[in-house]
Amino acid sequence: MPTPEDIWADADLPARRLAGVALNPSSPDDVLLRLLADGPEAVRMVLCRDRILPDAVVEAVLQHPDTRTRSFFARNPHADPAQRARLVDDPEWFVRAHLVQPPRLPHGGPHRPLPDETVVRMLSTYDNDTLDHSLYQQISPGLRRAMPTHPVAEVRALGVGEWGLLTAGTRAALLADPDDEVRDRAERHARLEDPAWVERALPDRPCHARWDLLMNQALSRTVVDGVLTAPVSEGERAAIAGNPSLPADVVVLLATDPDPEVRAKIAGRADLGPAERRALAVDPDPEVRLTLSVHPELTEEERAAIDYAIPVNDYFDVLPGRPSVPRDPQDVRRDATSGHPFLRQRAAQDQFLPPDLMERLAADDDLGVRVLLAQHHPDAPGPLLLRSFLEYEGPGRAHLTTRPNFPTAGLSAFADHADPEVRALAARDPHTAPATVERLTRDPDPAVRAALARHPNLPPLRLSELLDDEELAHAAAANPALGSEVMRQLVATRGQRHA
């Protein structure tokens, strides 16, 4: 079966013109419905997957006889999740499987959750061949919290995965659950908290399972002593150094380990004692000192006294999963007002940041703080978003333009910028001069050419020329200045152009 990339690669020039019409925000419903009914597969793919659709077209997509056409809509990141959810009982496995997969977001960002009742329906009716762990990205925070005690057994079974966050009472209920699968999953998690079971299950050879148990699960004293005296492979002391179950005396011992990787792991432990913190604060290894410098038990004075260096990054770890519940406001405020850039960066990622802290961090001297705030806060102001886009060139840069407050006015001033991504901002300014728009359709960068080919201020003659351009016909046909009669003519001729 051809991939979406294969489908597009096989599309000829007429099909690409029609695909542009399918994306055109000015296309009338009757044009879109005709493309849905008669268009080639590449056109139906673009129409159903890559834009917001009018209600009448959504209804037609949901009833479309072609399985792949419905599957394209199941993966539409622009559609309301409630619209996609109407495919939950689609007769074809192929469509249901694509509904499980979160849509591919063109510029990154968090996925919008499916309705709770849809997720419950999927968990209780789909088989294991259809379900996928990625469904979790489409589950709302409220349902995630409710899963361990949900009345539907299949939902509780998935909720067992939150074991580390569950209360003792909830854990006990899951261990006594009337459903076999729920009990079995709960028992597997409980076993991992039993050092004796972990000791028996620990493989005696290097493998993924051994590393997982050493790093994450409850360790007996026998296992710990074995790693200290006769490790099976190199690096096992570093593996146990971050394990929460490590005995206090071993934490003290490993704080003076000759391997700096081990000491760095120890420096990040919340249970590190005062004496060990003082020793690691002057450790000869810069990574150890940097790790220790963000320890939550340090005062700002102690933190400032550490000789740490912030590594020079050209990207930041943007867009992690959003927390389902707010952090403690006092902890957020402490981090936001810290002298340590890493702690301010942590605060900047909190979407619940209050207005005074958002204003403070928006003016922060650290690029990472500003970029992370711009990426995460729902009310990030326009000047911050634009400044972050101009100054940051790493992953997630394009996502900044999708934030609600990203400005449009005045962006034509960047039409001659050396960075092509910045030049392309001129396509977002509704007041970019027609001559500038036309000039940028001949830009050396293909992304700039394509972006400006869609600008409604493109002079009509140049727009007509681009409809015959092998590279830009698709973008030109998506230009909202294209008249509806031209669109209808293209549909009637199946994308052919006549002199």
Image (cartoon, helix red, strand yellow):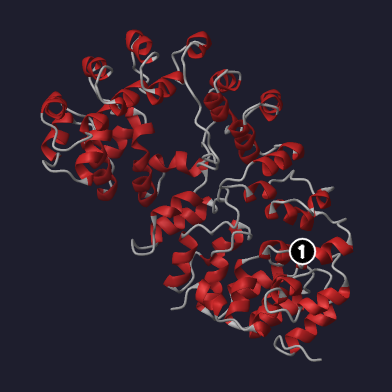
Q: Quadrant of residue 165?
A: top left
Would you name the residue on which mark 1 appears?
A: 452
Is 375 or 52 nearer to us in this picture? Answer: 375
Say which element carries label 1: helix
Image coordinates for residue 387, horizontal then vertical, percent: 72, 39
Up/down of 25 relative to 468, above or below: above
Task: Examine the rendering and report whether any part of residue 258 can be seen.
Answer: yes
Figure quadrant of residue 149: top left
Task: Answer above or below: position of 55 versus 17.
Answer: above
Nearer to me, 203 or 180: 203
Residue 374, position as x, y percentages in the image: 65, 38
> Which quadrant does the C terminus fall into?
bottom right
Q: Residue at x 74, y 43 (%)?
A: 405
- The spot of residue 411 in percent (x, y) is 80, 49
Question: Left of 31 or right of it: where is 10?
Answer: left
- For badge 1, the amino acid type reads Leu
Residue 187 appears anywhere in the view: no
Q: Nearer the viewer, residue 208 or 176?
A: 208
Q: Residues within 10 Å of mark 1 (few under 14, many from 20)?
A: many
Q: Is residue 7 left or right of residue 156?
A: right
Is 113 displayed left or right of 492 in the figure?
left
Q: In the rendered image, which quarter contains the N terminus?
A: bottom left
Residue at 57% in and 76% down: 8
Residue 412 falls left or right of residue 156: right
For residue 146, which quarter of the picture? top left
Vertical relation: 351 (above or below) 94: above
